[in-house]
Amino acid sequence: MIVICFLIMPQNAFSTSSPIQLNKKIFSWTDRVYITIYAPDFNSDPNIIDEIGVTADDKITVSTSGHSIPYRLVETGPNTGIFSGYVTLTGDPALKGSTGVDGQGTNPTGIQSTCSPTCGPTNGFLPSSNNDGVTVSFEYNRNEVVTGSGTISWNQGSIQWLQSSYPVNSQAIVQITDPDMNLNPGAIDKFDTSVWSDSDSGGINLTMTETGPNTGIFQGTVYLTTDLRSAGSRLHVSPGDTITAEYTDNTLPLPYSPSDQLRLTATTTAGTVLAPLEQAALSNARIVDSTGKVLSKVNVNQQIQVVSDVTNQQKRDQPFAYLVQIQDNNGITVSLSWITGSMTPGQTLSLGQSWLPSTAGTYTAQIFVWQSISSPNALAPSLPLQIRVE
């Protein structure tokens, strides 16, 4: 709890520092606003716990746009002169209407406390919107008031898997952080999100459970299975599958409007993920003629193939691009060609690209295997091969 300091000086003068400070500068629309006022002049009896906000000489009002409630705070202990409490913001259900914050009709309560004559120190409820403010005012003497305020705003959520990969037939945890979905700060909130795999594009609706009251952090556990169909929190996967979790954020900060949505996704992998340069093996680079005979030297204007063996070392299909770049002894590229395809798990292909040298000299062929031409992520280290043309 951050203390809101308020000092009563002689002749009702205040110190030059801010007399009231809230525990946050920016609140979510269903946050708790903790209030503490340091007012030693209102410690009227050092032997008891005093209150402020209960008379005309020490009125406290807590307000949001269009709403306010009279409030009282209680001394933190005998003779401390420090008074504390909190107000709970309750949002505005009209902002999202029947679709709700989760697309399923869930909304905050939007309730406001009825105070007779005052509320507090912890039972106050105030409606608030997505672009609002909360103000605490303390009238420490008739017509002499000090205030402290904070901003109320929606937040952009985030989604992530706690690991980049999970073994098949294990548990995977997805985490969503969005304070706007903490609709009841005194309870553990829940909502559903979508999760699917390459093997089951329909996927499941996963229940996300808040990690504790008022955290705004939600987690869901997915049980990955290779044998069973998807059901409940169980998701069917195959080794090497990409698993995707999706969260649609319906409560976005300015400049978004209340009707806007933002689709957020995060991915993880089922099974052990190989390092980028270990996903394929590239070996046995060689030069062959049109009959497949291996050549040690090449003649000018002789059609040849630059061939090597490529092995998919993963337990899933792998698209690839096989590239051959040939440079002369000055480092100038004289040929660049490629082929594309896909390999099944563990498959080895002998791949080649043709070249017709027009000039004698010593050349270097650099062989690459990439994920694709548009995604030049290397699946294996490149392989050089020297070519002598006579």
Image (spheres, rainbow, N blue to C red):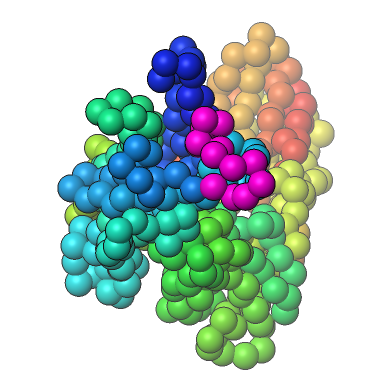
Image quadrant for the C terminus? top right
Percent from the top left, x then y, of residue 57?
Answer: 34, 37
> Magenta span: helix, strand or loop, mainly?
loop
Image quadrant for the N terminus? top right
Query: Position of 54 compared to 338: left or right?
Result: left
How many labels, in total? 0
Residue drawn at the location 69% of the way across and 57% of the way down: 163
| Residue 140 highlighted magenta (yes or no) | no
Query: Position of 124 compared to 357: left or right?
Result: left
Decide which of 116, 342 is in the foreground and name it: 116
Residue drawn at the location 66% of the way across and 82% of the way down: 225
Tell me if residue 96 comes above or below residue 325 in the rendering.
Answer: below
Percent from the top left, x then y, of residue 302?
Answer: 62, 32
Q: Quadrant of residue 263?
A: bottom left
Extreme top residue here? 330
Residue 364 visible = yes
Q: Which residues are magenta?
A: 37-50
Decide which of 369, 244 is in the foreground and name it: 244
Percent from the top left, x then y, of residue 133?
Answer: 30, 40
Percent from the top left, x then y, of residue 7?
Answer: 51, 25
Residue drawn at the location 59% of the way across and 14% of the way down: 332
Tell me if residue 139 comes above or below residue 290 in the rendering.
Answer: above
Decide which of 133, 95 is in the foreground and name it: 133
Residue 316 visible = no
| Residue 47 highlighted magenta (yes or no) | yes
Query: Position of 2 compared to 16: left or right?
Result: right
Decide which of 177, 205 is in the foreground and name it: 177
Residue drawn at the location 21% of the way across and 44% of the way down: 65
